[in-house]
Image (tube, coloured by chain):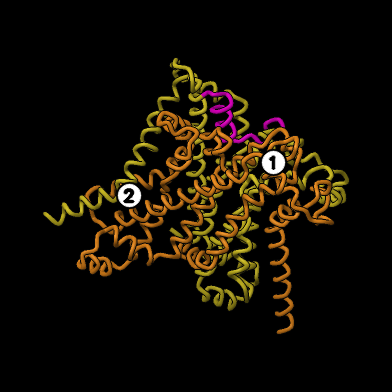
Amino acid sequence: MVGSKTWMNSFKYVLVFIGISIAVFPYAYMVLQSLAPWSQVDRNIIPTTFTLKSYHWLFYGSPIVRAKPWGRALLNSTVVSVSDTILMVLGAAIVGYALSKLRFRGREFIYNFILFQMFYPAIILLVPTFLIVKYMGMFDTYWGMIIPKAMSIWAIFMYTSFFQSLPQEVIDSARVDGASELRIIFRIALPMSRSITTVVALFLFMSRWEELLWDMMVVRNDTLRTLNVMIATMKGPYSVYPGPMYAASVLLTLPVLIVFLVFSKEFAKGIKLVFK
Amino acid sequence: MKRASWVEVRGWSLTSPYLIFTLIFFVLPLIWGIALLFIRWNLISPTREFVGLGNFIEAIRSVRVHAAFINTYKIMGIFIPTVLVASLSIALLIHSIPRFKGIIAVCFFLPYLVSGVASSLVVKGILAYNSPLSPLFRALFHDIPDWFGNPFLAVMVICLMITWKLSGYYALIFLSGLSSIPKTLYEAADLDGAGYWTKLFKVTIPMLYPAFYTVLILAVGLTFGIFTEPYMLTGGGPELATQTWYLEIYYQAFSAGRAGYASTVAFINAVVTFFSIIVVRKIMEGWGKAHGWK
């Protein structure tokens, strides 16, 4: 009986191993192909020798093809995603705090409107939002990518329901001590919800990082394109060089992976609270 | 009275970032979007022609819109059962093993981090005619299938890509559902002599109702918004087999420059999404009620 149980468990770990192999296969493939000599790209899974030629070509080009601003694209992705994530988390924490802890008139109405927005298909707003951005002079600027995506209804909803469980006495005693509402939010409410903030921020960061449609629409200028858009719009001479495209994909994937792994412990803790 | 107005001032000023944002990026486009439905306009020209219901009539007759409409349900028909089985299996597997649960769940979540742009490049590479996996495909199918030339295969590839991406994420939702099922239910089932599959279908799956509900709503909503994978791999082809709503909206607005018509297609997409989600919710709630959830 004990024997069959250990056998069963080893079988389960074999299944786990197969599953994880499928899950991470594209990661491995991307990295290996980006390091392969060009004659072997998409020919061998594991190249016989490794070279940094694809990365070199990406940043310096070749005598015939001038390099695109890939480093700049990586920077653009970072600037846009990081600023939007910070704005979305701060905004959601402030608004979520007000909606859960301050009984002001109109609170119910705002909360119901947020629920309405959550289920309202954002796609209808796509073209008119683009027009508004254009008329505000934000077309082809960082602002055009950052501002319209700077508020997340989902994050507000998450913080509103999470802050409800913060003990009122803590907040009241802080008020007695003369703390302002903003100070309470940043010194008490946010630090008390670290796990939830990690999950919210990671999801927001990941989805902002891989936004394609909007960033492709509002930016035409090569030097402002995010990495995701840059890869997606690569046509012409680049499409015949798959090696550098894999190198670009590695650049695109690595930052998200690193950010996620750094916070994965807190993420695992927080995710239980989110889906409980 | 003084206390009350203090709360009003704080409440409204703290929510003001949201209020201003919503006014500019929700209410204003909402109104503008309604106006756009009835005009023909190419985004640049100063003249905007009022066409009444012309955009609607054109959209309803368009084969491209028909294709997007039908394909979405086709993709759902393949993607949803596949992703449910995959994510539930992953969750059950992780739930049943004694050690390293957390790290394994995190590993299964990793595909969610890969941008559709990057995974599309990888898929393009491994499905290429001379790819390292081609001997495998040759052995399986006798020949290299024309992945993106065959309408059925093109849809399958896209469905499998999104299944790969989301299974680990949905498994997390199932996992937290699994951990909240009381052990006593299984003990009672054991006393009745129930086997593994009986317990799975009579205890586990009905008890996972809230998780199924969340996953299904997420998955249905996601299917209506598919864009990156077909944009990168097929452009909607072959013969519109992988045409989606978002591809059509993007194409009409920014390649054809037809703001009014694109908004109309978006509006129809929103209505279709809305009713589809209501139908899914009704079905799910019926299933939930039958198992004692309210």
Is B5 on the left-hand or right-hand side of A239?
A: left
Judging by the rendered image, the residue that carries numbered circle 1 is B155
Chain of the residue under label 1 = B
Q: Amino acid at mark 1?
A: Val
> How far is mark 1 from mark 2, CA to CA?
40 Å
Residue A23: image quadrant is bottom right
Give the number of the disc on residue A111.
2
- Residue at (33%, 52%) from the top-left corner? A95
Q: What letter labels the chain drawn in yellow?
A: B
The residue at 37%/30% (across/down) is B31
Q: Report the residue that reaches farthest toward the bottom.
A: A2
Q: Where residue B209 sits in the image (x, y, percent)?
A: 51, 59
Look at the image and give the residue range highlighted in magenta. Answer: B238-258
Tell me the chain of label 2.
A
Residue B90 position within the rendered picture, expressed as x and y whole percent measured from the top left: 64, 63
Colour seen for chain A:
orange
Residue A234 in view: yes
Q: Nearer the viewer, residue A160 or A132?
A: A132
Q: Quadrant of the C terminus of chain B?
A: bottom left
Query: Could you say whether the residue bearing mark 2 is in a helix, strand or loop?
Result: helix
What amino acid is labelled 2 in the image? Tyr
Q: Nearer the viewer, residue B267 or A193?
A: A193
As helix, strand or loop, the secondary structure at mark 1 comes to helix
**Number of other residues with Cα within 10 Å of mark 1, as a class: few under 14, some 14 to 19, many 20 or more:** many
Kindly identify the residue that appears in the image at 29 percent across and 62 percent down. A184
Q: Indicate whether residue B249 is drawn in magenta.
A: yes
Q: Residues within 10 Å of mark 2 (few under 14, many from 20)?
A: some
Q: Farthest residue in the left direction?
A: B1
**Relative to A85, does residue A173 appear above or below in the rendering?**
below
Question: Looking at the image, is A118 positioned above or below residue B108?
Answer: above
